[in-house]
Amino acid sequence: METQSTQPQRRSVSSLSLIEGEESVTEVVLRAMARTEDVRLRTVVASLVSHLHDFLREVRPSDEEFEQGLAFIAALGHATHATNNEVVLAADVLGLSTLVTTMNNSTQDGRTPGALLGPFYRPNAPRYQCGDCVVQDDSPGLPLFVSGTVRTTDGTVLPNAMVEIWQASPIGLYDNQDPRQPDRNLRGMFHADAEGNYHFRTVRPAGYPVPIDGPVGKLLAAQHRHPYRPAHIHFIVAAPGHRTLVTQVFADDSEILESDVTFGVHRQLVGAFQLVETGPGPWGDLQAPFYTLQFDFTLEPGEQTFPTPPID
Ligand code: BEZ
Ligand code: FE
């Protein structure tokens, strides 16, 4: 006759899902995520976990250090709001954004290198005719005449290509950071002529610091790094049937070209900012001193898309 056991039934546990030592943690975690249906998500998260676990095995943080690391990530979130994205800034100063931009913008076919969109791109840039000036105020600073040609990778010019620009002022502030500047000052959208040529007048931009009042600023200070970007102009260049180019052109006389806090200066994106000390401006409407910048862009055939502005 069978007797009813009063002992609770022991569940059989698969030793595969129990932790036994450092390496087993990674295996158990990867196995737990293996049923993810979205293949790309499964691959990316599995790789992320593997690399993060290897990273921890390498640096062997104390419990306190691990807490500090998590607190830093939480602080990035707390410092992120409508006008500042501290998470993006962290990716920028760690070189992650430039690495991804470089990986996704091959220059093999002669395409102009891409560069970060950055946090200051705004929608609704004023529409201008070629030759117009994007300076809406009387802030001091030397005039800068910018011109160039837009081509496709086989060298053919791209008539009517769209050229959008935005830049900081001669004191290193974008319009949205500086209540003294008119809205959308130093921003503009142009169309190249039938030969792919564009030209406009602006004022020479200055380099500027990235925001340093949050956790990224503390990290930079601890690393003895300055927070500056060299003087540059942002460009978006687009034409139908071509991959839109998001890039920046840097002033060749900037002293910090080699220490851009966001590592954005590609060799081919250094433009010759030439100081002209005597004579009339290239379009006859101004006298020296002024700067000129001649910079051509090459787009590759592909899909024309436009970036989403990070702010309004
Ligand atoms: C910018 O060039 O506008 C920029 C890029 C990364 C961080 C901060 C500013
Ligand atoms: Fe910028």
Image (tube, rainbow, N blue to C red):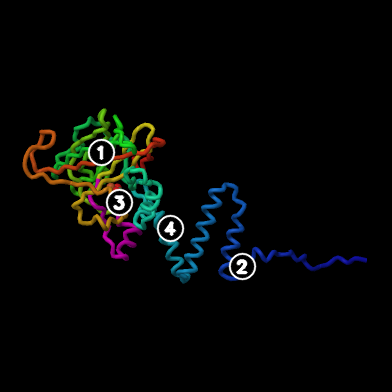
Q: How crowded is mark 2: few (under 14 residues within 10 Å), some or many (20 or more)?
A: some
The numbered disc on residue 169 is none
Q: Is mark 4 on a helix, strand or loop?
A: helix
Mark earlier in primary sequence (3, 4): 4
Q: Which of marks 3 and 1 is in front?
A: 3
Give percent across and percent down for residue 165: 27, 39
Q: Give the range drawn in magenta.
A: 210-232
Q: Mark 1 points at which residue?
A: 187
Q: Is mark 3 on a helix, strand or loop?
A: loop
Mark earlier in primary sequence (2, 4): 2
Q: How far apart are marks 2 and 4 (CA)?
A: 28 Å
The numbered disc on residue 19 is 2
Q: Distance between the residues labelled 4 and 1?
A: 34 Å
Mark earlier in primary sequence (1, 2): 2
Mark earlier in primary sequence (4, 1): 4
The numbered disc on residue 266 is 3
Q: Which of marks 4 and 1 is in front?
A: 1
Q: Distance between the residues labelled 3 and 1?
A: 23 Å
For badge 3, the amino acid type reads His
Mark earlier in primary sequence (3, 2): 2
Residue name at image x 37 percent, y 46 percent: 108
